[in-house]
Amino acid sequence: MGIIFDGHQQVFHLQGKDISYIFTILKNHQLGHIYFGKRIHHTDQLASVIRYAPRAYTACVFEGDPEFSLDYLPQEYPAYGKTDFRHPAYQIRVEQGNTITELEYVKHTISKGKPKLEGLPATYVENGDEAATLEVMLRDKYLDLDVILVYTVYENVHVITRSARFANHGKSPLQLLRALSMSLDFPDADFEMLHLSGAWARERHIKTRPLVHGIQSIESTRGASSAHQNPFLALKRKHTDEFQGEVYGFSLVYSGNFLAEVEVNHYDDTRVSMGINPFDFTWVLAPDEQFQTPEVVLAYSDQGLNNLSQTYHKLYRTRLARGTWRDEERPVLINNWEATYFHFTEEKILSLARAAKELGIELLVLDDGWFGHRDDDTSSLGDWIVYQKKLPHGLKYLGEEINKLGLKFGLWFEPEMISKDSDLYRHHPDWLLHAPNRRLSHSRNQYVLDYSRKEVRDAIYDMMVAILENAPIAYVKWDMNRNMTEIGSATLPKERQKETAHRYILGVYDLMERITRRFPEVLFESCAGGGGRFDPGILHYMPQTWTSDDTDAVERLKIQYGTSFVYPLSSMGAHVSAVPNHQVGRITPIHTRGNVAFFGAFGYELDIERLSQDEKDAIKDQVAFYKANRRLLQQGTFYRLISPFQENATCWMVVSEDQRAALVGYYKVLALPNSRFFTIKLQGLLPDVQYELQGTGKTFYGDELMYLGFQLPVKTQNPGDFTSYLWKFQAK
Ligand code: DGJ
């Protein structure tokens, strides 16, 4: 592994174990892109990949030279206005009012390891040998502006990370209108674009479309990465499937408004750009100030989509997530939300805890409604003080009683929000995002606190610390239940109002950093009305996220399948809930609800006291099963085998790191009359090792299961909707 600078050709070559990323310094001193993909040798002819020729109806950079035009040259961090007519990576309004800039190569450094990003979440290394970093300094000499492009290549994970830093050394302020994290030009457009789109309760459904000429993009303008579009896209070859073929992934480590854009030009070149959404964004870069973009993680696989996802899983589970809980087995929890909603008493929570203990559950989470005077969603956000009417003995007492029963205690917060009916609002009516004189739009009767302001964050921090220090709280659910409107801040000057949304996210990161550092033993789970902010940015602070408010087992097949494109199983909160399901009204068997939720950070979300003895017995077995297999489920290698987006069945499996244990989940949505027999080809096993199918005494070689396939038992043909099976294979 390493980074080569070939001075003779002026070529940079980042080489991981399996990937190469190559670019050069062009004649006009801008950076030209050469290659990203499977690792290739370094040769002395790499720069000649870039071809120059006079072309009709274009504009050229140098007088007398009809061959050098940025209209078609592949680039690394392009600008608009100097012969490239495509969307640029950045755009700056300069003092004179125009947006013409030229970033020329000045120097570079190559170092071991990976530097931190100031104030932003990012992937990291634990020792310097895991990765190497290249920083290329570009300068606009008339503006005295430096832009530092930062590239890291990991040795064993097939990714390149990229970000950009702007530093104004000039005397005048500059306006960053667009400051993306990366841009990358491919020499063809023979791709399909895959993205994860949805809405509340149906997050991260997989969408695929062929590239066409022009711009195709996904974005968020909601102030959060959103349930609607995830900050991820992949470009796959048409024949690429889960198991074979080329695919490139682009994942933005950011939780706010983003843009992921693919532009195909008239020569069938493809430009991928990603970063903070330029829409409704302007950042004033004053003299001596710097602006750091978020990081993009670019991944490559020539072995299909599963392999790409496994790359992200490994990196995000071990080098994006942090803290005590990163590698720990996550507890089986019960959350009272769907059991009681707002209507609980101290005694009800304690009796739920007693019943949970009987079933082997390890943690009880008290959700919304424990603070201020909150009986519904119209009040109290911002008043993080216990609601005496519901919890007369306080949180300390409740936590200790739960601990005495042998369970840990967890608590819900929604730290970024404020209700008008709250003391916080009465004392600080200007602490929310707003635009002067404009009526405030509400969502779920709540408003968004202005997290760009430190005093606002400090006040929430103090309230949270007081709660977390004074009660035995082992887990926190950090919720966020609305998107932004009237985006403006009372304290920013008018020329900086368009910084508010990004400053807000920086503020969220700041508070998450402070709280998680202050309470390193606490397990934090993020949430945003379900999976409305399930992104790599938040995962840096909180190792798991509530995947969706939709807990229906059938809906969850699609949601979890789609989420697994980028995010590891350890990050996906997945709970068994009641039937009829509260979101869709569907009745599914308890074993199917368990079999789906096992493939995530497992728990329950229902009133277990109301269940029949049979259901309680089933839960007891599920909890015991999960505990026995959770390391495998949370940290194993995950494979998608049959897609719920294409079939009536779904199948996925997880294989232990040593490949000696595997769990296969198979889910049939609707019963099929008189159907054919099914066979599934398993993945990731050791071909020469014999595996026992637990509970049957039958053994199979790994190659048999992977190539001949596992013949689904005849019982799986049996009628019945929403049935499922779980098979464990253990090496003998
Ligand atoms: C939305 C979350 O996704 C739910 O799990 C629950 O915590 C509610 N908010 C509480 O208001």
Image: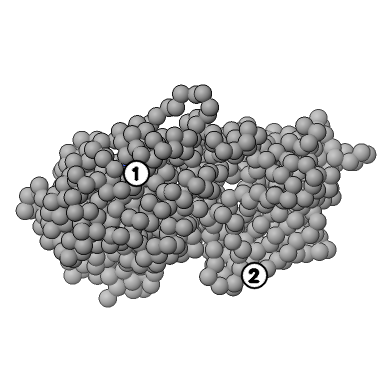
Circle nearer the N terminus (2, 1): 2
Decide if ligand 1 comes within 8 Å of the CB at mark 1.
no
Query: Residue 466: image x %, image y %?
Result: 35, 56
In the shown orientation, is residue 352 left or right of residue 523? left
- Decide: few, some or many residues near mark 1? Use Cα within 10 Å; few <14, some 14-19, many ≥20: many
Disc 2 and disc 1 in contact, CB within 8 angstroms: no
Residue indicated by mark 1: 383
In the picture as drawn, the residue positioned furthest to the front comes out as: 427
Q: Secondary structure at mark 2?
A: strand
For the residue carrying disc 2, how many other residues have a C-alpha within 10 Å: few (<14), some (14-19), or many (20+)? some
In the image as oriented, which residue stretches furthest toward the left?
A: 613
For the residue labelled by badge 1, is the local secondary structure a helix, a strand or a loop? loop
User: To which quarter of the image does residue 443 belong?
Assistant: top left
Q: Nearer the viewer, residue 353 or 206?
A: 353
**Real-space CA distance between mark 2 and mark 1, rounded to the nearest whole angstrom:** 47 Å
Residue 79 in the image: state x and y as whole percent: 74, 41
* Amino acid type assigned to the residue bearing label 1 in the image: Asp
The kind of residue tagged 2 is Lys
Residue indicated by mark 2? 112
Residue 153: image x %, image y %?
61, 62
The structure residue drawn at horizontal position 63% and vertical position 44%, both measured from the top left corner, is 180
Q: Is residue 584 left or right of residue 502?
A: left
Residue 457: image location, x then y, percent = 47, 48
Query: Does residue 362 sit above or below 142 in this rendering?
Result: below
Q: Nearer the viewer, mark 2 or mark 1?
A: 1
Quadrant assignment for the C terminus: bottom left
Residue 476 appears in view: yes
Residue at image coords 54%, 57% = 122
